[in-house]
Amino acid sequence: MAKQIEATYGNALFELAIEEGRVDALYEEAKALGDIIRDNEELVKLLAHPHIAKESKVEVVKQTFDGRISDELTGLLVMVVEKNHARNIVGILEYFVKQVKKYKRIGVVDVTSAMELDASQKAAVEKRILDTTPYESLEMIYHQDKSIIGGMIIRIEDRVVDSSVKTKLESMSKALSRA
């Protein structure tokens, strides 16, 4: 149910952003607002509290965000609170951000390597991914994990390319134990 709520409101905001030609502005604003709300659990608890009147919650939203964020996002927050979906605010904003990334062909890539990559290695990885995917730009997230021994593990959405030495050794071990 939560995923459906996030998709419904996230898609509505996305369609509005396209219709008004404000995709970039709302994208940046939604990312920042998501971070702010994620860091302020007390606000979400207040907005989702069952014993506080909706009118009071709406007033809190308006006093907190009017003039600080766009009317579109303030309106979204008010609507979500009025429909008792305040616990889904962060998820809705994250869904919207993902939709914009798909629309703008921005890939989010998670790269794990045994050693820290230098700038030229990172550039080579990014170039290779751009050459082999439909993305026009990338958000690269780098991790270091010495347990993979060597090679890399690259994750893009639900796809994983695992060329780590650890995985190759595990595969060889399984093959030898079957023999």
Image (cartoon, rainbow, N blue to C red):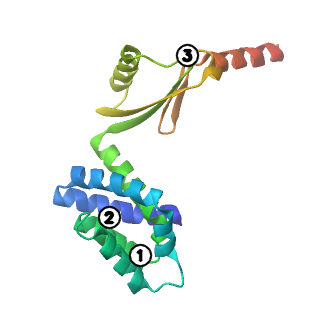
In front: 71, or 133? 71
Q: Position of residue 102 (x, y in %)?
A: 34, 44
| Quadrant, the C terminus | top right
Checking the image for residue 134, the label placed there is none
Residue 66 occupies quadrant? bottom left
Which kind of residue does numbered mark 3 sit on?
Answer: Gly
Q: Residues within 10 Å of mark 3 (few under 14, many from 20)?
A: some
From this view, report whether residue 19 is shown above or below residue 106: below
> Which of disc 3 and disc 2 is earlier in sequence?
2
Residue annotated with mark 2: 12
Report the mark closest to the observer, 1 or 2.
1
Q: Say which element carries label 2.
A: helix
Q: From the viewer's perspective, tell me whether residue 170 is left or right of residue 91.
A: right
Report the mark closest to the observer, 3 or 1.
1
Residue annotated with mark 1: 81
Q: Residue at x 33, y 69 (%)?
A: 76
Q: Say which element carries label 3.
A: loop
Q: Residue at x 27, y 60 (%)?
A: 15
Real-space CA distance between mark 1 and mark 2, rounded to the nearest whole angstrom: 16 Å
